[in-house]
Image (tube, rainbow, N blue to C red):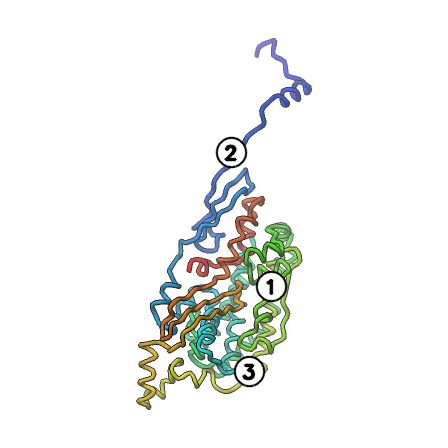
Amino acid sequence: MPTDYAFPDSAAKAAAATEAPEFQTEKMSLAMGPSHPSTHGVLRLSLELDGEMVTKCDPVLGYLHRGDEKIAENMTYNQFVPYTDRLDYLAPLANNAAYAIAVEKLANLTVPPRCQAIRVITSEMARISAHLLGLGAYGIDVGAWSVFLYSFTEREKLYKLFEELTGARFTTSYSRIGGLARDVPEGWTASVEAFCDQFLPILEEILKLLTRNKIFMDRTIGVGVISKEDAIGYGLTGPNLRGSGVAFDLRKAKPYSGYEQYDFDIPVGAKGDCYDRYLCRGEEMRQSVRIIKQAIKTFPGGDWYAKDAVRIFAPRKEKVLTSMEELINNFMIVTEGPQMPAGEVYFEAENPKGALGFFIVSKGGGVPYRLKIRGPSFCNLSILPKVCQGNLVSDVVSILGSLDFVMGECDR
């Protein structure tokens, strides 16, 4: 070491610091997805980072695109029912019902009370199933594995009930234009009520694992705040809208399928952060159980399909096998589709992810001229560029989980 070397004193350091140029950092581009486990499907986020801070976020869609809306224009109204299963594939029973009601609105057709009650029960069961999966996946996102195991155990019980009713666990294709594929089997409503009775205490246990969990609270409270104005401006619906303090629910605002006769509350948040959105979904499951139990208590008898829908709803098999007229009618419905008047209609239902809408343009006949789907997950993701900016990369995972989207609705 040279003998004339001397360490600078603090005053010399301060002087040198004031003369040095400002320290500059380069921003880094990071692709999160489309195969990242926390993107809940094939979503890609193109992030721009300044250290750990997100300065820009661009969601990139289209990896799952299937062209559902164009497919609908090349098949009959009935043939498109299975395609609705693949929108929010976590709640196919709710998708089927929403689409069927939209076409029935076009045909000016009213289904019997029993059909409406069954659609309400199955849609609320689908809401519970979808929220349970969202809750379990959210738990994994923030590091809580036990929640996932509890929630999927309850979903398995629901899937068993779905299979008893529809013959399928996942893609149910249950609703029909003018009715349902079949009536509920004997004793099925009692099994649903038994599930509800045992589910409520288990739900409370599941929520206790997160609601006052210090790690979960630190990762969600004050993170991903969406103001009431932004939630409305970006077209958010469902729990993401209600989590920001907007008490809007289509089941209350524009009742359908007899929802006006059931008593239930609309949970709303106060701050619009990830924690509020989680709390809203937890309370929605309690309210869904409340609706299901009311629907079972007042479960009507009678037909489960509209008997006056002669050229729309396919006749029962026993009639097809015993009547030439019914056989010909069945052949015409299958080959040409249910006959609809010319016109256009829009209907949206309160699905687990938000407002699922169908806009149908008809020129008459059995095939829609145009069909447009309003996917709630697609609209909910539109706020990502704003809500992610200024948060840490680890917060993006919490924000995505709190929005609870499904890419089947986004990439239609």
Q: Are marks 3 and 2 in contact (CB under 8 Å)?
A: no
Q: Secondary structure at mark 1?
A: helix
Q: CA distance from mark 3 to mark 2?
A: 64 Å
Q: Which residue is mark 3?
A: 299
Q: Nearer the viewer, residue 74 or 21?
A: 74
Q: Position of residue 91 (x, y in %)?
A: 48, 67
Q: Secondary structure at mark 2?
A: loop
Q: Is residue 206 left or right of residue 303?
A: right
* Camera sees residue 285: yes
Query: In the rendered structure, which disc, 1 or 3, sits on the residue that comes first in sequence?
Result: 1
Query: In the rendered structure, which disc, 3 or 2, sits on the residue that comes first in sequence?
Result: 2
Q: Are marks 1 and 2 in contact (CB under 8 Å)?
A: no
Q: Which residue is mark 2?
A: 26
Q: Amino acid at mark 3?
A: Phe
Q: Position of residue 286 (x, y in %)?
A: 61, 69
Q: Looking at this rendering, what residue extends furthest in the right direction?
A: 11
Q: Amino acid at mark 1?
A: Gly
Q: CA distance from mark 1 to mark 3?
A: 26 Å
Residue 326 picture quarter: bottom left
Q: Quadrant of the C terminus?
A: bottom left
The nearer-to-camera label among 3 and 2 is 2
The nearer-to-camera label among 1 and 3 is 3
In the image, is residue 179 above or below residue 409? below
Query: In the rendered structure, which disc, 1 or 2, sits on the residue that comes first in sequence?
Result: 2
Q: Which residue is mark 1?
A: 282
